[in-house]
Amino acid sequence: MAILLSGGGSNMVRLIESMTGDHPARPVLVLSNDPDAGGLAKARALGVETAAISHKAFKGDRPGFEAALSVPLAAARPDIICLAGFMRVLTADFVRQWQGRMLNIHPSLLPKYRGLNTHARAIEAGDAEAGCTVHEVTAELDDGPILGQARVPIQPGDSAESLAARVLAQEHCLYPAVLRRFAAGDRRPILLP
């Protein structure tokens, strides 16, 4: 499987660390849109091949960026792609190539709060809980069949940052569990309390 990221790669690290023993998947590539993404060095330290295609070189040309992104993906030949903090919106054409084989983790209890600033939005709405969702990627932003969710209570006095830290801890548990099940051909959702 290949992992696409844009930042530090904490979910990527958890996914790679989980793929040992009888796990049905193995990492073949970590790919970033940012050559300076901290996750690339972490992936190399874990012995996984890396590549970077700067989206800045393709300003206004998403299809061109995705064509360049497809070159290292084609060479690595993954069966599954996991988006792990990949902060680029992918076109419908790119998504169609990987339909049914691409996963994403999103920091909200979808279908609530698609897009950005999910933790602040949940707090502002007065929600009792927040969480994260792993879903199959479709052409619609933060949509697609839900494969897992983990819930986190919103505590009095929570800031977006404090809530994000607790949700991230749940992401680190949920994403590896969903990937193991998905790679084994099981799409039943995993629900963590």
Image (spheres, grey):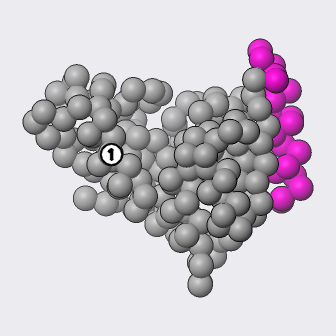
Whether residue 99 is visible to the viewer of this picture, yes or no, is: no
Q: Is residue 73 magenta?
A: yes
Task: Residue 185: say if magenta.
Answer: no
* Front position in the image: 93 or 55: 55
Number of labelled discs? 1
Q: Residue at x 65, y 71 (%)?
A: 25
x, y percent for residue 20: 59, 79
> Quadrant of the image for the C terminus?
bottom left
Q: Is residue 153 above or below residue 27?
A: above
> Which residue range is magenta in the image?
57-78
Classed neighbour count for the residue bearing mark 1: other residues with Cα under 10 Å, few (<14), some (14–19), many (≥20): few
Left or right of residue 182, residue 49 in this image: right
The residue lying toward the viewer, choosing from 38 and 72, is 38
User: What's under tag 1, amino acid-wise?
Assistant: Ala
Identify which residue, 3 or 39, lies in the foreground: 39
Q: Please identify the residue farthest to the top as the structure is shown.
A: 60
Q: Nearer the viewer, residue 134 or 11?
A: 11
* Residue found farthest to the bottom: 21
Residue at x 86% of width, y 36% of height: 68
| Residue 85, quarter of picture | top right
Which x, y percent locates residue 145? Answer: 51, 47
Q: Which residue is disc 1 drawn over?
A: 165
Q: Quadrant of the N terminus?
A: bottom right
Identity of the residue drawn at 68% across and 32% down:
90
Query: Seen in the image, is 101 located left or right of residue 145?
Result: right
Residue at 86% across, 35% down: 67
- Counting from the top left corner in percent of width and height, residue 63 is at 82, 26
When the figure is inspected, residue 168 is found, relative to residue 53, above or below; the finding is below
